[in-house]
Every structure is written in C-alpha cells, then in structure tokens.
Image (spheres, rainbow, N blue to C red):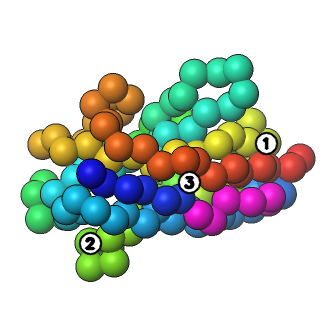
C-alpha cells in the first residue's frame, strides 16, 4: 500500500502563489506516476498535472491546458515527495486538491488509472 498526505493548501489572493506537497510512504514511491487533481463542491474531480517516474521518460510532465504556464509539477524521489507549484491563481481554482499515484508506464490524466489517493488539501483563492 502507498499512503499519500497532502499539505500546503490555504488562503491566497487572486494572482498569488501556493506550493502543495504530497508525502508518500509505504510502497515504493520512485516507481509511481504521480498526479494532482482538484474538485470543487458539486463538481467532478478534474485532472491538473502528472509526472512520470524520473528514471523513465526523463521526468515527463503533463498539464491540463487550463494550468499550463502557471503550474509546475516536480518530484523528489529521495524525499518521497511530489510538489505542485501554483502561480497566478484564480478565484475559480478554489478547490480541494488531491495527490494521486499510479503504477503505470507514463503520465496520465485519467482518474481511474490512479489507485492511491490522498485526503486532499483545500486551496481557497480570494478575489
């Protein structure tokens, strides 16, 4: 089993930045594709970003169009942690952000491919 714990959420003004962290424990972290998703109340969970295992695919990253150029995903396999740097945040990005892991070959935006999920961290962007 792989346990995931997110942190770094909070309240930020529009245009501001936050850095989310996701600490993993349990099963081997370095072999997992890691992803970030987000969900607002009453809405479906949506893909934000994904990153491959660094040793494969040279650390390939994948972003939703809505966050390209503003969000950056990274990982530190030595620390068993994945990060999401979020810049130029918008009020409609007020969501619960979830970290997820999948033991698959490459990055994915498909929620169903991720078998491990964190509990989520709230991000609130004020206007």
Q: CA distance from mark 3 to mark 2?
A: 23 Å
Residue drawn at x 61%, y 33% as measured from the top left: 39
* Magenta segment includes 35: no
- Write the start and end of the magenta stretch as one range: 7-12
Q: Residues within 10 Å of mark 1 (few under 14, many from 20)?
A: some
The residue closer to the viewer here, 73 or 66, is 73
Number of numbered discs visible in the structure rendering: 3
Would you say the residues marked 3 and 1 are in contact, meaning their CB atoms lie under 8 Å apart?
no
Q: Earlier in the sequence, mark 3 or mark 2?
A: 3
Q: Earlier in the sequence, mark 2 or mark 1?
A: 2
Q: Position of residue 16 (x, y in %)?
A: 74, 62
Q: Which mark is residue 70?
A: 3
Q: Which mark is residue 124?
A: none
Q: Residues within 10 Å of mark 2 (few under 14, many from 20)?
A: some
The residue closer to the viewer here, 44 or 5, is 5
Q: Is residue 45 left or right of residue 124?
A: left
Q: Position of residue 17 (x, y in %)?
A: 68, 63
Residue drawn at x 51%, y 30% as measured from the top left: 46
The residue closer to the viewer here, 28 or 59, is 28
* Magenta segment includes 8: yes
Residue drawn at x 16%, y 41% as measured from the top left: 104
- Residue of label 1: 91
- Residue of label 2: 77
The residue closer to the viewer here, 86 or 42, is 42
Q: Is residue 26 left or right of residue 85?
A: left
Q: Secondary structure at mark 2?
A: loop
Q: Position of residue 6 (x, y in %)?
A: 53, 59
> Among all residues in the image, which is located at the extreme bottom?
78
Q: Residues within 10 Å of mark 3 (few under 14, many from 20)?
A: few
């Amino acid at each position: 089993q792989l346990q995931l714990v997110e942190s770094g959420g909070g309240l930020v003004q529009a245009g501001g930045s936050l850095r989310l962290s996701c600490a993993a424990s349990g099963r081997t972290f370095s072999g997992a594709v890691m992803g970030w998703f987000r969900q607002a109340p009453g809405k479906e969970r949506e893909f934000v970003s994904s990153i491959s295992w660094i040793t494969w695919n040279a650390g390939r990253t994948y972003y939703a169009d809505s966050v390209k150029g503003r969000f950056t995903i990274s990982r530190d396999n030595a620390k068993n942690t994945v990060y999401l740097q979020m810049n130029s945040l918008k009020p409609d990005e007020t969501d619960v952000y979830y970290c997820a892991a999948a033991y698959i070959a490459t990055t994915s935006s498909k929620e169903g491919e991720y078998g491990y999920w964190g509990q989520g961290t709230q991000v609130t962007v004020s206007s």
